[in-house]
Amino acid sequence: MSPTAPPLSRDLIDSLNAQNLAALQDEYHSLGRVLERRGCAIDAIKQRLLSFSLAQPSWGTGVGGTRFARFPLAGEPTHLNEKLEDCAVVQQLSRITPRVSPHFPWDKIGDARAMLERATSLGLRFDAVNSNTFQDAPRQALSYRHGSLAHTDAAVRAQAVEHNIECIRVGEALGSKAITVWIGDGTNFPGQQSLASSLDRYLESAAQIYAALPPGWSMLLEHKLYEPAFYSTVISDWGSSMLAAQQLGPQARCLIDLGHHAPNVNIEQIVARLHRFGKLGGFHFNDSKYGDDDLDSGSINPHQLFLVFNELVEAELRSPADFDPAYMIDQSHNVTDPIESLLSSADAIAGAYARALLVDRAALTEYQQGNDVMMAFQTLRRAYNVDVTPIVAMARYERGGAIDTIAAYRQSGWRPRKARERRATSAGAGIV
Ligand code: PSV
Ligand code: MN
C-alpha cells in the first residue's frame, strides 16, 4: 500500500524548523555542556528518546466532556477515518505517537482490512483494542445497567464476553497485539451485591476472554477506584488487578491509568510492585487534581510523572528481558483543541522520561545503601530540575517532526480547514 501524502505540508514544517533550528542547536549544545560536567552524554539521552513511543487514543481526538456537557469543536473528527487523519497530524509533528488505540463500538470499523490500509497509508499502526461494556450500545440485546463481566445474570456476562472476543478478532485483523479490559462494574450501595461473588463472576468471565487470546497477545486489566460505581468497584485497585492477572495467566497483565487511584496514592510504588511480579502491562497517561479528571499529562503534577518514569527506568535496568510496558495517552480534552493537547502531552511524557534518564543511578544506589537520605533525594532532584526541552525537541526534529509542534499546527490551518470539510458533531452528553 503506497503512503498517502502526509496531512500537513512538509514545506511548512521545514520552513518553520529552519527558523527555529539555530536557537535549538545553541540550547542543545549548551545543555550538553552542563550534562557533560555531570558525566552524562546528551546524545546518549537523545538516542534513548529516539526509540521511545506512545499510542494515541482514538477517542482523544474528539472533544470529551464532563457529566454535565460537551462543547463540540468545529472540525473535530466524526468517525474513525477522520480520527486517524488527526492522529496522523499529531504523529507528523511529534514523531513519537505512531500507534492508535481503537475503542469498540465507539469506533465503527466496517472493513477492517481497508481500515488497516488507511492507517498504514497515513504512517500509523493500531495499538491495543479497547472493549466497552460500561455503556449500552444501540440495538444491544441485554443492558449493562447492573454490570457486565460480573453481572448476576449469566446471559449478560456471556454477551459481555462475546463483545470482548469480537474485539480481539477485529484487533487481529487490525494488527493489534493486546486488548485492554476496563469494566464499570460495581455498586453504589452497601449490600447491593456480594463483594465476593461479583469478583468470582468477573474472574470466570475474564477467563473466557483470556482463553480466546491469540498467541503473543496480552490482556491488559485496567483497575479504577470508582466511577461510574461509587461505593465499590469490582477491579478497584492494583491489588485486585494483579491477583486477577495472576489467576488468569502469563498473557494477562495490569494497566495503570494514572487517574484511577485515590488522591495522593504512591503510583510510582505501584509501578515497582507490578514489575517485581512480572505484571506491569502498560499505562494510560493523563493527570488529575481530584479524581479521574483525565487532564493533560504533566499539567498538574509533573513531578509524579517524573517519579513514575524514574521507576520505569529502574525496572528496565533490573530486568530488561521482561520489561515491555505499553504506553498510551488516555485523556479527555474538554476545553482545548485535542490535537494540541495530544502534542503537549506527548512532549510532557517524553520530557519526564528524559529527566528520569538523567538520574545518576550509581550515585543514587550508593546514597541509598549508605542511608544518606538528603543526597539520595538530591540525586533525583538534580535530574528533575533540568529543563530537558532541547533534548526532546532535538530528538523530534531528527525524526522529522516539528521543533515547535503547536506553532506549526496552528500555522497549518488544519482545524479551520476541517471545520469547512467535516460535518458538525452534536453537543450530547460527555464521555467520562
Ligand atoms: C475509564 O475511565 C477509562 O480510563 C478506560 O480506559 C476507558 O476505556 C477510557 O477511560 C475511555 O473513556
Ligand atoms: Mn484509561
Image: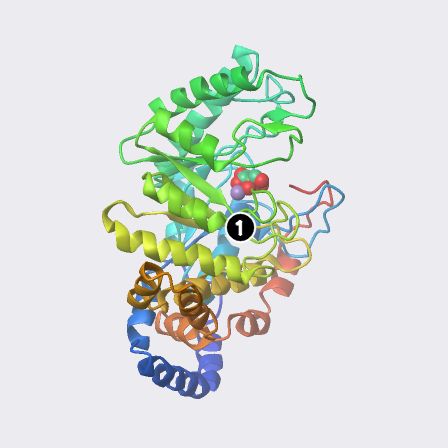
Q: Can residue 366 be seen in this view?
A: yes
367 or 302: which is nearer to us?
367
Q: Quadrant of residue 417?
A: bottom right
- Give, as a three-letter code, the residue at label 1: Lys
Vertical position of residue 12 compared to residue 255: above or below: below
What kind of colouring is applied to the model shown? rainbow
Q: Which residue sits at x=53%, y=59%?
A: 342
Residue at (74% x, 45% y) in the render: 427
**Residue under the point 34% across and 39% down:** 177
Where 98 falls versus 192 (above or below)? below
Neighbor class of circle 1 (other Cα within 10 Å; few <14, some 14-19, many 20+) is many
Percent from the top left, x then y, of residue 264?
58, 49
Q: Mark 1 points at which residue?
A: 83
- In this view, which residue lies farthest toward the top? 154
Quarter location, residue 137: top right
Relative placement, left or right, of 348 versus 364 is right
Residue 403 in the image: above or below residue 432? below
Percent x, y of residue 131: 49, 33
The answer to whether any part of residue 1 appears in the image is: no
Residue at the spot x=48%, y=73% of the render? 385
Q: In which quarter of the image is the C terminus?
A: top right
**Residue 103 locus on image (x, y percent):** 51, 39
Residue 83 appears left or right of 191: left
Assign ligand 1 to one image quadrant.
Answer: top right
Front residue of 272 and 180: 272
